[in-house]
């Protein structure tokens, strides 16, 4: 069983390593089992796709975002737009994400 991840869909993240280092984007999808995220407009990969009869898909070379390991991205703090680590705080039996830079709750 995979551990719970601290980055979720629709979070703004900064890529801290790899070919897209320094770029920011919105998380489109999170895969907790493989510990990977898809970030909008980053790590673009090309896939050759065959046209399918009866489908609206024309085929050809399609560009789409590829997965990035979760350790290679940092959450951007919405209050000051700078990268931050994420901590977990429990209040009244509920679990909340907290920005380590500012101490503010994220959800």
Image (tube, helix red, strand yellow):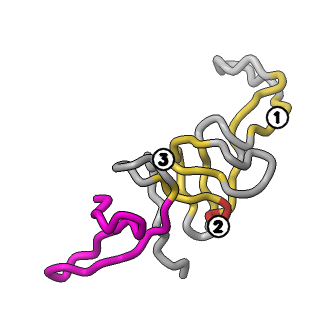
- As for residue 106 lying within the magenta part, the answer is yes
Give the Cα separation between the discs numbered 1 and 2.
Answer: 23 Å
Q: Is residue 80 left or right of residue 107?
A: right
SS at badge 2:
helix
Query: Foreground residue, 70 or 87?
Result: 87
Give the Cα separation between the discs numbered 1 and 3.
Answer: 24 Å
Q: Is residue 59 left or right of residue 101?
A: right
Closer to the chain start, of discs 1 and 2, is 1
The relative height of residue 9 versus residue 44 in the rendered view (above or below) is below
The x, y position of residue 33, in whole percent, is 59, 70
The part of the chain drawn in magenta is 84-107
Q: Quadrant of the C terminus?
A: bottom left
* Comparing labels 1 and 3, the label whose residue is closer to the camera: 3
The x, y position of residue 24, in whole percent, is 59, 43
Closer to the chain start, of discs 1 and 3, is 3
The relative height of residue 35 versus residue 48 in the rendered view (above or below) is below
Query: Foreground residue, 100 or 2?
Result: 100
Give the residue displayed 81% in from the left and 30% down from the top.
49
Give the Cα separation between the discs numbered 2 and 3.
Answer: 15 Å
SS at badge 1:
strand
- What numbered label is drawn on residue 46? 1
Closer to the chain start, of discs 2 and 3, is 3
Q: Quadrant of the N terminus?
A: bottom right
Q: Residues within 10 Å of mark 2 (few under 14, many from 20)?
A: few
- As for residue 77 lying within the magenta part, the answer is no
Give the residue displayed 64% in from the left and 17% down from the top.
56
The x, y position of residue 74, in whole percent, is 56, 59
- What numbered label is drawn on residue 24? none
Residue under label 3, please give it.
12
- What numbered label is drawn on residue 71? 2
The x, y position of residue 85, in whole percent, is 49, 68
């Amino acid at each position: 069983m995979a551990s719970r991840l601290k980055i979720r869909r629709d979070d703004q993240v900064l890529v801290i390593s790899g070919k897209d280092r320094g770029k920011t984007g919105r998380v489109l999808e999170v895969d907790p089992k493989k510990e990977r995220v898809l970030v909008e407009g980053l790590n673009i990969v090309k896939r050759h796709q065959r046209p399918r009869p009866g489908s609206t898909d024309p085929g050809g070379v399609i560009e789409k975002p590829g997965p990035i390991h979760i350790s290679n991205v940092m959450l951007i703090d919405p209050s000051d737009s700078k990268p931050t680590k994420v901590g977990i705080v429990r209040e009244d039996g509920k679990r909340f994400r907290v920005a380590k830079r500012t101490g503010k709750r994220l959800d």
